[in-house]
Amino acid sequence: MTVLCLVEPDATAGAGLADASLRALALAGRLAESGGESLAAALAGEPTPDQLAALGSAGVTDVHAITSPRLSGYAPAAFGRSIAGLLPVAAPAAIIAAATDHGSEVMAHLGAIIGLDLVANCVEATWSDAGGCALVRYRWAGSLLEDAVLDTSPALLTVATDAPGSAPTVAAGGAPKVHQFEPELADSDLLAEATESAVGGGAVSLATARVVVGGGRGVGGPEGFAPLEELADLLGGVVGVSRVVTSQGWRPHRQQVGQTGTKIAPELYLACGISGAIQHMAGCQAAKHLVAINTDPDAPIMSRADYAVIGDLSQIIPALVAAIRARS
Amino acid sequence: MEILVCVKRVPTVGGKISLTADGQQVDTRMSGFTISPHEECAVEEAVQLTERLGGTVTVLTLGPPEAADQVRDCMALGAGAGVLLEAGDQEWGPMATADAIAWNVARLTEVSGGYDLLLFGNEAADTGDYQVPVRVAHKLGLPCVTGIKHLEVQGTDAGDGQRIRASREYRGQRESFDLPLPAVVSVKEGINLPRYPSLPGRLRAKRAAIERVSPPWHADGVRTLGLRLPDLQQQNARVLGAGTEAVPALLELLDELGVLS
């Protein structure tokens, strides 16, 4: 038997695989190892040499390249149908994808098409001696963990995009074998097909920023963000905000950090006037260093922060900006 | 335009999440209930569409009798009708939930002609299963897109020829979908800024009739053994100081972290 992992290319053209896919491969590899199974991968289109190398060093022995003259772009139902068509060929004991927007919806289509359960946002999976697949999955975006057993076969799982991606369990065993697969698609599978276009920008992205200066309810209103913007500029970072700030309309939603906004992973997150609701913390738990500035020394964020300054951010931030300017 | 919005009752969780003694559920003795942020936006989007194009918004939930509160909250925002699928004492997994919703849509389609659009939140805040809308779409044979941040209806006549244009951003690219109606769409927070309920809206919702139906249930293949809190390092932050007197220490820390250019 085999464990089949769906993978996505890195967003940067010419590079290998998406970080979330590497984490999904790591979990898939651990699951395959627990059952003495081989590891296979499936992806849309022809794999690049970089992708094949990344798959090989993750322990993948077989790669299914899905191509169809009927597909010009990303079509979620068609990809679900393709994987369903691949099942008799690959005969997997489990099918796994990263819980990205694409991975989650393709797996949901697959689950609906073949009529099987799908467990979302797993961080651990092993075959249980008692039968079934023993899982640990996120609830509340990782603020809670659920232990569960999935009894259906093949087991369908998605892997949290910030799941631990431990080093490959298999030593690099040469290039995987590539198998071409052309799925049979129905017209209805192609009703929803994406047309891609570039999004304007070029600004530092919240998701990848090295420094994020966060503002919450304590900023007090839309006009209170100017000093935070100035500080973020000085530190080569960007401003992120809590949900209350966007639901009040003080700042646009694209700046929201949290469960229903962007997940950040900066070197420094300077959270100003943010109490630390779990939905917010789910979006910033990957920050290397968390500094909280808050008037309330008992705010929930204090038990998660590395450093704290107790006080009024409307005085502290301008003073910090002045101090940084005076220094250079 | 006839729109069905599906929502889920979830605990209101703030700075801390606690579990019941048996570790099977979130302890809700000290919290209220609400719907998920993405779903608040689904309700707002539906209300805005019917304000522009006419028609009715129906809100549906599957849950305990108390979930009627969440249906009324949505009706206070402008939904005209409410349906409560009674969950009884069963555990409803995402497959059974989707089947119950599709069952009810098929039932209502026979009675009243059905819906042009089925709106959902992208995922529920608590279980985050990311699959109910897609499963409903397959059950009903409808096209489906998820994670939508911008939605436009093209054509003003309901029925033949009306289409939607739905888009989202994915890894730096805008993905646009052009779909015939009826369709299933799940939206994400940020698609709009939900309104607050008006007083007349609240009063209307309080008196509104909510249809209660018991859908068929089936077990799913996932057995939950229990919930637990992750081992987050609970720590006490090192206090650098109070007020502007802390600025030198803060500056020194930024320097140490190498973020001062």
Image (cartoon, coloured by chain):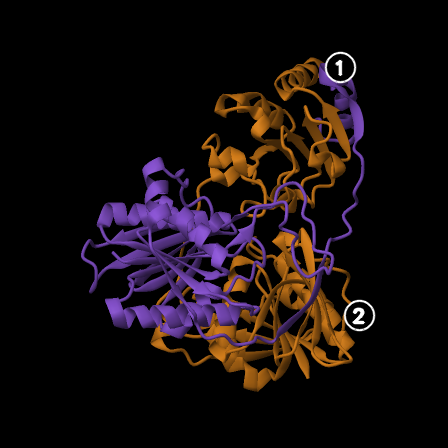
Chain colours: A orange, B purple
Please indicate whether residue A299 sits to the left or right of residue A263 in the image.
right
Q: Quadrant of residue A264?
A: top right
Is residue A56 shown to the viewer in this render? yes
The x, y position of residue A66, in whole percent, is: 51, 74
The N terminus of chain B appears in which quarter of the rendering?
Answer: bottom left
Q: Amino acid at mark 2?
A: Ala
How crowded is the residue under tag 2: few (<14 C-alpha within 10 Å), some, or many (20+)? few
Q: Amino acid at mark 1?
A: Glu
The x, y position of residue A20, in whole percent, is: 63, 58
Q: Secondary structure at mark 2?
A: loop
Residue A171 circle label: 2
Q: Secondary structure at mark 1?
A: helix
- Please name whichever residue, B132 or A194, is drawn nearer the observer in this view of the structure: B132
The residue labelled by disc 1 is B245
Cβ atoms at labels 1 and 2 below 8 Å apart: no
Instruction: Select label 1 or label 2 by which is in front.
Output: 1
The x, y position of residue B127, in whole percent, is: 58, 59
- Please name whichever residue, A225 or A236, is drawn nearer the observer in this view of the structure: A225
Residue B189 circle label: none
Is residue B173 shown to the viewer in this render? no
Is residue A289 placed above or below B42 in the rendered structure?
above
Residue that appears at 41% across and 72% down: B138
